[in-house]
Image: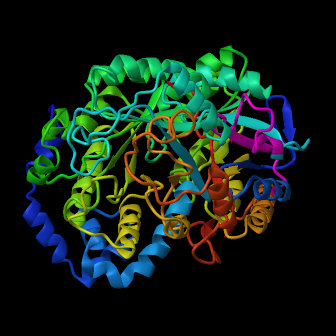
Amino acid sequence: MNTDFQSVFEKYSWQEIKESILAKTSADVQSALRSDGRRNLEDFKALISPAAMPFLEEMAQLSHKLTQKRFGKTIQMYVPLYLSNECQNICTYCGFSFDNKIKRKTLNDEEILQEVRFIKSMGYDHVLLVTGEANQTVGVPYLKRVMQLIRPYFSLISMEVQPLDETDYEELIEEGLNTVLVYQETYHQEDYRLHHPKGKKANFEYRLLTPDRLGKAGIHKMGLGVLIGLEDWRTDCFLTALHLDYLEKTYWQTKYSISFPRLRPFSGGLDPKVEMSDRELVQLICAFRIFNEEVELSLSTRENPVFRDHVIKLGITSISAGSKTNPGGYVVEPESLEQFEISDERSPKEIAEMIERQGYQPVWKDWESCFV
Amino acid sequence: MSLKIADKTFNSRLFTGTGKFSSASLMEESLLVSGSELVTVALKRVDLKGQDDDILSHLLHPQFNLLPNTSGVRTAREAVFAAQLAREALETNWLKLEIHPDPKYLLPDPIESLKAAEELAKLGFIVLPYIHADPVLCKRLEDAGVAAVMPLGSPIGSNKGLKTIDFLEIIIEQSKVPVVIDAGIGAPSDAAKAMEIGADAVLVNTAIAVSQNPVAMAMAFKMAVEAGRMAFEAKLAQPSRQAVASSPLTEFLNN
């Protein structure tokens, strides 16, 4: 039978999920924590519920142990390369939003190579390409050309760009694309429409089914997540876990990663509707690890240094450092419009030293570009 | 007491991995203490273009033979390509063939592994395939010309020990090539057990690398592997649930 995530998603109601999470008790949490086998989605609900808060240290210990067993004492290093801030979408929380009347920039080949050389000089071998959604300038032909241009410099190339069609992904995978990050932002449909009033991104369903298209195209790894701050994070993260669960069973040859971006300020932007405390973010990280021992968990420079230093041991498996969130930010045009303000300004070298001090090995290369 | 695989003789029956350590220098120290003479390295983790790769530069000891592995490939075609790259870059025709298209449990694909093994053996590689504890597959791989077989004890990195022991025993009984038990060995007692049932060697990574004291754990595994092998060679007494004092059924023959 040919199904997709839509058919799974439609069986759930936002309100019912929200209530059932709030109804979880400490007995549910204890049963999730002490389970011998693998945890299910109901266990995940318990682990992200308010009832789990008194068990945070126990969750952290378990998450630490499970992460080391699977990933060892290592942390993967990646860095974003913003190619363009041109965008036809209006997203109420994003610096690149179409209605943000600031000068736009798309890097040309020579500028990309300048940025690449700088990124290489920081020690990176894995890179994440980022753009806004502007199909005239940064469509598939542009992305394909960039892949061909930079492939000789990196072992692993990821992308966080607009959702594409299955055949587009196939073409880019042929060019060496390994990983695609596509965040749903929120699974709350009405709220999604409020935050994305204009542009192709306004199409909730097309975005929701992007992981299915990626899976069908045979991508090696995909990253999921929601933007924390738009809606009730517990319900949104449960739906992320549900999505992950469906995808792992359907596209079993693909690897998955989860991110937990908390809404960051940018010029003229929106304040979070829902605040998530550091304590709650730790709870969420541990809950994902206890729920799924194999999923990669990633943390960006949105988070501050003290927080980042402490969560290295709690379940995170990959982090960025020295990031710029504007096109040309490393060398070409340091003052161009950035997507969001970063909180951790330390260099990759400083971050690597911090990781080593904690008894972990920073990993710069974990792929071979010949594996297509 | 030595083990021969293809053209090489090993005094240590403990093979080791290089992943998951907190630093390359701790890896080096642990592997030296383990006495291991065959060390597997993921091709995807080493910098083949650079001159001073952090992992390789810590493995420059004459007792360490490198066993490049193809972790990350999903098909026989990719494995053959990766093998050729490894042979050129690391100057060895030894290869740990790993094809696990399932990135969650990293379970090996028997069909692609057999295809790749057939082709790689023809290309002159010394192939050590990582596979399920499947006795028939092991015989098929033997026919394909592999130098040893590496069946799993339990899922890789799981530390669950020899869950597949009944099948491992059949493999050991039938195999004409050395049997190296790979994956799942979580404690020195698992390694000792593997040797006691007659495995030719074991491969251990996670249990050493992730322990609180990898150097001490490496030593513990070295001793366990030696003890287990010695016990196997000395012929273990069969365990019995009760003392056998008389022979009620055959006693009449003595009258």
Q: Is residue B142 left or right of residue A66?
A: right
Q: Visible in this render: residue A370?
A: no
* Residue A241 in sight here: yes
- How far from the left and from the top, in percent, is residue B137? 53, 32
Q: Foreground: A305 or B208?
A: A305
Question: Is B55 one of the magenta-colored residues?
Answer: yes
Q: Residue at x 69, y 59 (%)?
A: A353
Q: Indicate whether residue A119 is drawn in magenta.
A: no
**The magenta segment:** B34-57
In the current view of this chain or complex, which residue is farthest to the right? B62
- Asked whether, in this view, residue B144 is left or right of residue A98, the answer is right
B243 vs B166, left or right, is right
- Which of the 4 quarters of the picture holds residue B64? top right
How many discs mark residues in the rendered view? 0
Q: Quadrant of the N terminus of chain A?
A: top left
The residue at 69%/30% (across/down) is B95
Q: Is residue A100 above or below residue A55?
A: above
